[in-house]
Amino acid sequence: MALTPLIDPFGRRIEYLRLSVTDRCDLRCSYCLPKGFKGFTEPKHWLNFAEIERIVAAFAGFGVQRVRLTGGEPLTRRGIVELASRLAAIPGISDLSLSTNGTQLEALAQSLARAGVRRVNVSLDSLDPMIFRQLTGGELERVLRGIEAAQAAGLEPIRINTVVMVGINDTEVEPLLDYCAARGLTLRLIEPMPMGQTGQAALRASGTLEGVRRRLEQRFNLIPDLLPGGGPARYYRLASTQTRIGFITPLSQHFCATCNRVRLSAEGRLYLCLGHEHSYPLGEIIRTGISDEMLKEHLLQAIASKPERHQFNTQPQQIVRFMALTGG
């Protein structure tokens, strides 16, 4: 039986849920959280696994097949492998993936693969240990070992996400591309998102990816390409190779017209758009004891409020929450 799809007011089909399981992180990336930040949600307010499973099942009832576990750093959530297993078993969920900083992958990659996680995106902003520590406060080698463990566990494809900041790591793009090419990985370059004071400062300092793209086009013949997945990257293949590079450009070339995703925060707020402060309190609602049918009605109401486009270019100052508190 065909499922009724979730269609927003602008005719876009919602088929991708990005699910934050925690707003905590074991790194402190400079464009994400300010140093010394302590304003995290108390774990007692997070959705529990039964609540998460129920909401994901409701989305699956509308034909949503793709779910990505995010954070904060999702692998710091206790019991994350159990949760992955429960979500992978929900009828209709065919693509369970993970975004991670890689620090816990060495220990968990095999278990996550057995639980049903199919593919993984790993944040990696530099191959220089000193720059990496400057940007994140963490140890580069730990992340590199995590990527190796993910490959050994069969989590494919692996995509490397790099937030490019001029004057800090923009010269790292070519070494990262070489690293990915040697290992069969895909590199994705991301413009800083103007979320909270840290993201807005990173964007002011760095600008968009246009300069990096032009630089790469002088060295490589970039052929437009497609890769499976529900995300917004525009992909290219390096001519005469199987190496691919993606550009995620919410500012210089926004992809609002094809947006197919919503985000659920750790405490259960459904964000319909990264570039708006508006959210729908699903967590509060399901704790009132509503039925599954009522939950589906609330999903329909939420999707009906999805805006046409973000306001990063026109009102960036209005987005005061940090990325880690929203879900990646």
Image (cartoon, helix red, strand yellow):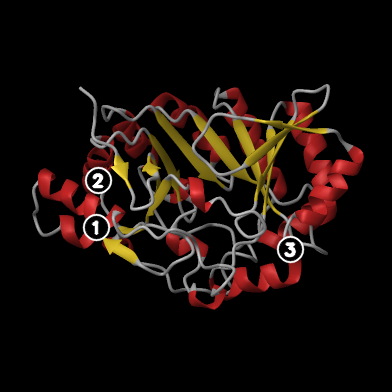
Disc 3 designates what residue? 134
User: Closer to the observer: label 3 or label 2?
Assistant: 2
Q: Earlier in the sequence, mark 3 or mark 1?
A: 3
Against 245, residue 167 (above or below) is: below
Neighbours of disc 2 within 10 Å: few (<14), some (14-19), many (20+)? many
Is mark 2 in CB contact (under 8 Å) with mark 1?
Answer: yes
> Amino acid under label 1?
Leu
Q: Earlier in the sequence, mark 3 or mark 2?
A: 2
Q: From the viewer's side, name the closer residue of 126 and 171.
A: 171
Neighbours of disc 3 within 10 Å: few (<14), some (14-19), many (20+)? some
* Residue 322: image location, x then y, percent: 50, 68
Q: Helix or strand or loop: what does disc 1 sit on?
A: helix
* Cα distance in 3D space between marks 3 and 1: 37 Å
Residue 282: assigned label: 1
- x 16%, y 55%: residue: 286
Disc 2 designates what residue? 55
Q: Helix or strand or loop: what does disc 3 sit on?
A: helix
Is mark 3 in CB contact (under 8 Å) with mark 2?
Answer: no
- x 62%, y 36%: residue: 159
* Cα distance in 3D space between marks 2 and 1: 8 Å
Q: Quadrant of residue 44?
A: bottom left
Q: In this rendering, would 267 be left or right of 133?
A: left
Q: How many marks?
A: 3
